[in-house]
Image (cartoon, rainbow, N blue to C red):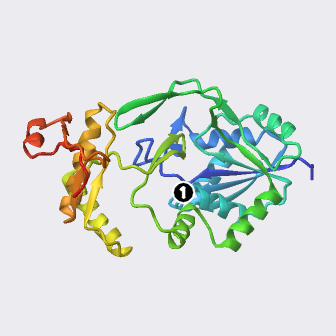
Amino acid sequence: MANNALSIILASGGSGLRFGSTKVSKQYLKIKNIPVFLYSIISMNKISLIKKIIIAKSADIEDGYFLNLFKKFKIKKEIVLINGKNTRFKSVKEAFEISQINTPFVGIHDAVRPNFNFIHINKMMTQIGKSDGIIPISKITSTIKKVKNKSVLKTIPREDLHVSQTPQIFKTEVMRSCYKKIKKSNLNYTDEWIKKKKEISKPPFYTSTDIRVSENKVVAVDTNIFPAGFNNLSNDFLKKSAKNIKMYIEKLNLPVERILIIPELHTRNPFYWDNIIAIKKMFEIAGILSDVGLIVDDGTNFMIEFDSTSDLKTYLEKGLFLNKSPIQ
């Protein structure tokens, strides 16, 4: 077998919910009467470096559907069909372990990317060198904005930003070693890792993560430890959040009698003040006294009015001012 021989795992078990297709997953939709996933396989069939194709398919689609297509389009490569799992990670892992890959390299490709071609593969195999793996990337040409509470905070420089693509190629032994380490540490996937960390770490009172969705990947790009966005919650979810606050305090056995909410004074964003009002309301529902204000050294008492997006007079009449005075 050639030193650069390659097996390809084709992830084809997704539901396509983000694509908006509820009846047929996007990889099985047809373009010019050919299913999207099949375009990649037709291209793979022409590349001599590729020795085996492992398809992690949707479990509800019979093998016969694929076999008939392979016969019709004269696919001669060795094909292994397995039922995909409920996550991409699990599907790829299952495909790798069941198919007994014996080529020096293994590639992972998404079935919804039909523009698979020899030029990509040849270039990647030429450049992988002594690296454990290689992935194709493309420059971001769109303007990227950081947004919080529906307000643009800043423009993100895009010179160093790239979007990852597939196929992604790795040395087979490196992949095998990684899966063994994951199995040994009993961390099979991200959710279990988070669960394990939560068991040994005291969680913060609040944290939020901004995420970016790119193709089939979700990436955390920013984590905050100050509360925001509660103005977007319905009354039902405010009540659920209040219940979680109460459970958090009881679980950690915290002697909380009163909470001071310290806001930003420099912002003029009315949605931010809606958020502050929502936080105070959650504490009230949880049965916890709360104040909105600052702690100052000189004992000065004065009030600052703030604008929210609605019911400004109502809030002022209820006395929901910024009370810049020490908490008694």
**Residue 56 falls left or right of residue 235:** right
Q: Residues within 10 Å of mark 1 (few under 14, many from 20)?
A: many
- The type of residue carrying mark 1 is Ser
Residue at left offset 46%, top offset 65%: 203
Residue furthest to the right: 2
> Is 209 rendered above or below residue 138?
below
Q: Secondary structure at mark 1?
A: loop
> Is 303 rendered above or below residue 225?
above
Residue at left offset 36%, top offset 50%: 227
Between 124 and 81, the one lying in front of the other is: 124
Residue furthest to the front: 298
Residue at left offset 62%, top offset 56%: 56
Q: Position of residue 195 (x, y in %)?
A: 51, 68
Q: Position of residue 92 (x, y in %)?
A: 65, 58
Between 165 and 278, the one lying in front of the other is: 278
Residue 200, image quadrant = bottom right
**Residue 58 falls left or right of residue 95:** left
Between 307 and 171, the one lying in front of the other is: 307
Q: How many marks?
A: 1
Looking at the rendered image, the quarter that the C terminus falls into is bottom left
Residue 290, image quadrant = bottom left
Q: Position of residue 295 (x, y in %)?
A: 31, 49
Q: Position of residue 93 (x, y in %)?
A: 66, 62
Between 26 and 328, the one lying in front of the other is: 328
Residue at left offset 79%, top offset 60%: 101
- Which residue is denoted by mark 1 in the rendering? 58
